[in-house]
Structures are given as structure tokens and as C-alpha cells.
Image (cartoon, rainbow, N blue to C red):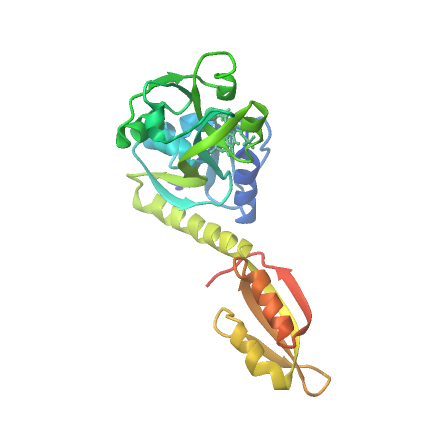
Amino acid sequence: MIMILRIAIQKSGRLYDDSVALLKECGIDLRNVKDRLKTESDNFPLEVFFLRDDDIPQYVEDAVADIGIVGENVVYEKNREVEVVEQLGFGKCRLSLAIPRGTDFPGLHSLNGKRIATSYPNLINNFLEKNGVKAEIHEISGSVEIAPGIGLADVVCDLVSSGSTLFMNGLKEVETILQSQAVLVRNKKLNESKLQLLDKLLFRIKAVRKAKRNKYVLLNAPNEKLKQIISLLPGMKSPTVLPLAESGWSSVHSVLNEDEFWEKIEQLKAAGAQGILVVPIEKMVI
Ligand code: PRT
Ligand code: ZN
């Protein structure tokens, strides 16, 4: 029997484009992705199911799919028996409490006795319990932000990314309950062959993610400044140094992490580096 790994991803919505793009960046070709319930890859033993994000944890727990891509907010709200394998760096948002602007928020205790509208009853309940607050939860499935305006609730607990939805509805964020991003989850009882396929996929995902967080840097350095310039560069082992056609100069190649990128570039310039080129990296295998 040919072993195939089945992955569930969102059918349409905020995670769809990035999920499909990630698989493509991992070199996995997908046939006819649009408006399909499922599809297969020609060049990797992967079958893709397109589902509502809310259903993905259950499908993975029930082994209808072996793995899935879904927001941490959904994973922890649904609380299904799945294992989070890897954070994927997209779909970033936070689950926050918000109250009408112009209202005071002296602290969490002020939520006692209040009505909170949310699509995340489990996460908010756990949070309130942990903080010793007793409030009334009103579960609604969409447009949570309008609840205070129509008199349904005093407080909302909803996902926020830019904050503009809260702002446009006259609300202000007062407390973050959870930071979330898309993650890869897996069924806890995968057999050995499926685990091997998952390892293969994860290896590719990590290489793609690592490459995105790093840039390839090439620069020219006068030889008398080489030592100082090299000391600024990490490189994967150590920087590559090649002589330039013009004597007294070298070309230095290295890899820089996005967190320290701009600071390092400034330091390199100040140390005498010239002609600095920065190139994106497609895959990075260490
Ligand atoms: O149909 P299906 O059930 O699959 O989709 P859905 O409508 O439930 O989910 P969808 O596509 O809206 O979101 C899927 C996932 O994207 C969520 O579970 C989160 O993990 C992630 N995500 C990231 C977000 C946001 N950012 C986000 N901003 N999900 C929703 N929002 C909404 C939020 O609910 C609020 O209405 O966007 C609004 C706030 O955005 P800002 O930018 O105005 O703050
Ligand atoms: Zn949903």
C-alpha cells in the first residue's frame, strides 16, 4: 500500500493563501486547488482536505486527516486531542478583551458581573477562572464587536490584528488573553510511515521558514578592515571571503538574521564595508 499523508487546511479565509503558499514553497505541487474539497500532490505523497478552520482540530483528532494547519486560537478553544508540532509564522493575531472607549478599566476585577460577548467561550472562561473573575459569557458566532453597541454585552473578547475593527466600533483593547499564529497540528497516534512523511514535510517547512528569517549579504571590504568586518558577521559557519580583482579588496559573503539585520548593516557600513548587497534566501538547510 502506498502511504500518503493527509493534511487539512482552511477552505477559504485568512489562512488559506498562506497555507497553500507554504506547501508550494516546500516544493509540493497541488492540482486544481480552487473550489475543491480535496486534492493531491503529484510530487509528494500528500492529500489536502479543504475545511472550515473550526473543524480542523476535530478532523485531526479523529484521524480523518493526519495533520492540519490552523490558528492556535482555534486549537486551544476546541481543546481536542491533537499535538502542536510547529508554529508557522502567519495568521498572527491576539485574543483580547475590549470595552467601550471612554469607559475606565481599573483592572480585571472590574469585569465581575459584566456581560462578555465572544466566539471563544472556553478560552475566556479559563482566563476568568484563573483570575478569580465571575462574568456572564454570551457566545456569538460573528460580528462580536457590535455587541456593546446594540446592548448585548458590556465587554467583547475577540481576535485583533491591526486593531481597526475595535477602533471603528468605539472599543478599546484592555487585556490580551492569548497571542496566536497558524500552527501545524498532528494526530497523536500516527504510524511510523506517516511520521516519516511528517518529518520530511517538517524538514522542508523549517528550511523555508528559516530562509524567510534570514538574508544573504555580500559586501566589499578593504583588506585592512577585514578583521573588524568579519567580527561583525555571524555566517552559517564563518563568513566566506574572496579576493576582488582590485588588489587590497575582498568580497565578504554572509547570512544575517532579520532581528539584527538593520543594526548590523549600519555597523558594517561604519566599519568600512562598501557595495552592500542583500539577497533573499529561498531555502536554508543547516
Ligand atoms: O469559514 P471559516 O470558519 O474557515 O473561517 P473563519 O471566518 O472562522 O476564520 P477567518 O478566515 O476569519 O480566520 C481564520 C484564522 O485567521 C483565525 O482563526 C485566526 O487564527 C487568524 N486571524 C488572524 C484572524 C485575524 N487575524 C483577524 N483579524 N481571524 C480573524 N480576525 C478578525 C477578527 O475576528 C475581527 O473581526 O478580524 C477582525 C479584527 O481585525 P483588525 O485587523 O481590524 O484588528
Ligand atoms: Zn471559523
**Residue at left 47%, top 27%?**
51
14 or 178: nearer the viewer: 178
**Name of the residue lying farthest toward the top:** 151
- Side (left or right) of 253 relative to 97: right
Residue 206 image offset from top left, x and y in percent: 46, 53
Residue 252 image offset from top left, x and y in percent: 61, 75
**Residue at left 35%, top 33%?**
76
**Residue at left 52%, top 77%?**
231
State whether residue 208 is above or below residue 20.
Answer: below
155 or 282: nearer the viewer: 155
Residue 92 image offset from top left, x and y in percent: 49, 39
Residue 281 image offset from top left, x and y in percent: 58, 59
Residue 78 visible in this rendered orientation of the protein: no
Residue 259 visible in this rendered orientation of the protein: yes
42 or 107: nearer the viewer: 107
227 or 16: nearer the viewer: 227
The quarter of the picture where residue 121 lies is: top left
**Residue at left 61%, top 66%?**
265
